[in-house]
Each structure stands twice: as structure tokens, then as C-alpha cells.
Image (cartoon, helix red, strand yellow):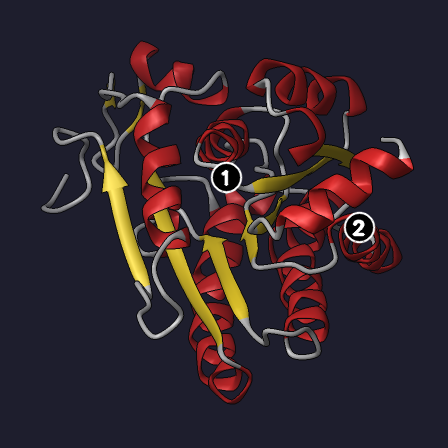
Amino acid sequence: MSEREVDKVKAAGLRVAIVTGAGSGIGRAASLALLRDGWSVVLSGRRAALLQQVAEESGAGARALPVPADVSDPQSVRALFDRAVEVFGRVDLLFNNAGVGAPAVPLEDLSIEQWKQVVDVNLNGMFYGIQNAFRVMKAQTPRGGRIINNGSISAHTPRPNSIAYTATKHAVVGLTKTASLDGRKYDIAVGQIDVGNAGTELAQRMTQGVMQAHGVVAAEPLMDVEIVGQSVLYMANLPLEANVMFHTVMATKMPFAGRG
């Protein structure tokens, strides 16, 4: 991005978001929804080529800024926020979305390395994002901003053989509640979106059949991932005096409530 383009974006006084895991799936859908609504979006993820594709697809020009980063590395996350402030002058929204899973194996067979990888991304990475958002948002003028954490349906109800993913997503609920409390004095609103079976590349296996709690493999319905993008946009556009602390969006016939 040229200096002229940077100055033009800053002068426009646009709303600025950082989206982690922006190169695919839910992060991509949310990024495109925000960009189409006029937000400036820092597209973050590990794969630079995918971030560039999202930026080009959006047609948003200088408002879409790809910044590769690894959320499990605290220095990388800090550099991400510093770059956002350098280019756009502030951060109004963090969509704390990046996450990974582990193989669906019995918990006694899960390796320590697999466990730590999920914790590093889904829990530690989520905290690094929150901490840096607080650092920037409490010091900027106007003060404050919004953080939306991606909790997942697994933040409430586990699938079989999912202990690492489920444990970290349950922990995200604690991060959301505590950050929401601690953010009040800085005008920082913190909420969580819990997504079930959105139509992403990773979720396509759901349509082929996945293990249910009662031991039967069954196909599950998906919803359009664009619906999730619109949900994030709705939460993002609320005035800071209002907050959706928990928002669940899922395919209507997905098994979640009830037994089975």
C-alpha cells in the first residue's frame, strides 16, 4: 500500500477491523461482509496468498489490508495490531476467529503435542488478541471498541472425541465474560459468536456423516457461511452502549438441543 493510499484511508475516518483466520471459512465470510459494509479490514492469517485472494475478491482496494500473522506467537499478534494502527490509525473491532482442531481420536490417544497445538491457537491466541485489542482500544481517541470471540457450538456442547477443541472453546466463554467485565471501564464491548455447521470447506465432512453422542454416524445439515458473516456484521455495527454477549447461529436442524 502506497503512502498516498494510507493517507487517503486515514482521512476517510473509516471503521477499522482486524479479522484473524481471514483467509478461509468463517473469517473470510466475515471479512467480506465487513468490507462490503464499508469497514476497513486487516486480513490476518498464516497463508498470505489466501489473504490476498480475499482482498482482491472484495474489490475494496486500500480498505483491505492483508497482514500474515501467527496467533499462537504473542510477538506476531502485537506486530499485527501495530501494523493496523500504523496504516489505519486505530482499531474498532477485533473478530478473534482463528482456531484449529485435533484428530477425532479417543482422548487417551491424543498426543501431548496435539493438545498443546490446540491450546496455543484456540486459547493462548485468543488471549493475545484480546490483550492487544485492550492495549490499543483503551488508548485511542475516540476510546473503546468491540471484540467478538469465535466460541463455537463446542463452547457449550461437546462432540465425541473432541477434548482439546471442546476444552479450549469452553475456556473462550471465560475469556469473553472476564474481558467483557474488564472492558467496561475502557468502553470496550466483548461478545461471542457460537457457530454450528456453517458451509465451509472444513465442515463438508458433516454432510458425509459424523459420530453422534449415542454412537451412530449420521449426516448433519449445513447453513450458508454467509449467514455467519452477516451475524458478525450485525454484532460489529451495534453502538458501544449495547452488546450481544452470546450469539448462537446454526443450521436449524443441526443436533444441538436435546439428547442423542
Tag 2, which secondary structure?
helix
Distance from label 1 to label 2 (Cα)? 36 Å
Q: Residue at x 24, y 16 (%)?
A: 219
Q: Residue furthest bottom?
A: 185
Q: Position of residue 45 (x, y in %)?
A: 71, 35
- Give the vertical position of 60 relative to 185 (above or below): above
Q: Quadrant of residue 52?
A: top right
- Give the vertical position of 201 relative to 95 (above or below): above
Name the residue beneath numbered marker 2: 80
Q: Position of residue 26 (x, y in %)?
A: 47, 32
Q: Earlier in the sequence, mark 1 or mark 2?
A: 2
Q: Residue at x 53, y 67 (%)?
A: 145
Q: Residue 203 got which mark?
A: none
Looking at the picture, tell me which residue is in the foreground, 183 or 58.
58
Circle 2: residue type:
Leu
Q: For the residue carrying disc 2, how many other residues have a C-alpha within 10 Å: few (<14), some (14-19), or many (20+)? A: many
Tag 1, which secondary structure?
loop
Q: Quadrant of the C terminus?
A: top left
Q: Quadrant of residue 141?
A: bottom right
Name the residue beneath numbered marker 1: 106
Is residue 38 visible to the viewer in this orientation of the structure?
yes
Q: Position of residue 36 (x, y in %)?
A: 46, 29
Q: Residue at x 9, y 46 (%)?
A: 258
Q: Residue at x 59, y 73 (%)?
A: 142
Q: Nearer the viewer, mark 1 or mark 2?
A: 2
Residue 65 in the figure: left or right of residue 73: left
